[in-house]
Image (tube, rainbow, N blue to C red):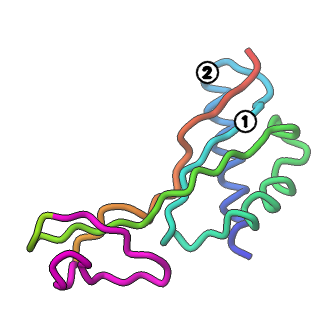
Amino acid sequence: MHELSIATAIVEQAGEIARADGAGDVTSVTVRVGELAGVVPDALHFAFEVARDGTSLASAELVVEQVTAVAWCGGCAAEFAVGMPPFFWCPACDQPSQDLRGGRELEITAVEAVH
């Protein structure tokens, strides 16, 4: 389960962000996870609970914002969801697209902590 290594990195980075801000215990961490990032949100939640034990995030909540995978069609200037498994064929003009615009994100967007 690679979600455990991701959760461990989230705990470490969120702790560093809180310390740099002069804060104490972290109360919540928000992450954006793209549909094509290869991360299972439920597994990430479980792994986060394991990784946070004994840290300044021991009682922190993990908020996962899922990002839909979208592509851009240069032929008709349309943006469309590629789905899962991904299908990079424009539903508007019936042409293939090679321009993925979103869906691979895996980033911390917010860390809330006690000051």
Q: Which residue is at a point 71% across and 57% down the rendered structure image?
A: 7
Front label number (1 vs 2): 1
Residue closest to the eye, 86 or 25: 86
Q: Quadrant of residue 26?
A: top right
Q: Magenta span has 79?
A: yes
Q: Which residues are magenta?
A: 78-97
Element type at marker 1?
Answer: strand
Q: Nearer the viewer, residue 26 or 84?
A: 84
| Majority SS type along the magenta span | loop
Left or right side of 16 for 47: right
In the rendered view of the protein, which quadrant contains the C terminus? Answer: top right
Structural crowding at the residue carrying mark 2, measured as other residues with C-alpha within 10 Å and reported as few (<14), some (14–19) or many (≥20) = few
Residue under circle 1?
28
Q: Residue at x 78, y 55 (%)?
A: 48
Q: Which residue is mark 2?
A: 21
Q: What residue is rendered at 77% in x and 57% in y?
A: 45
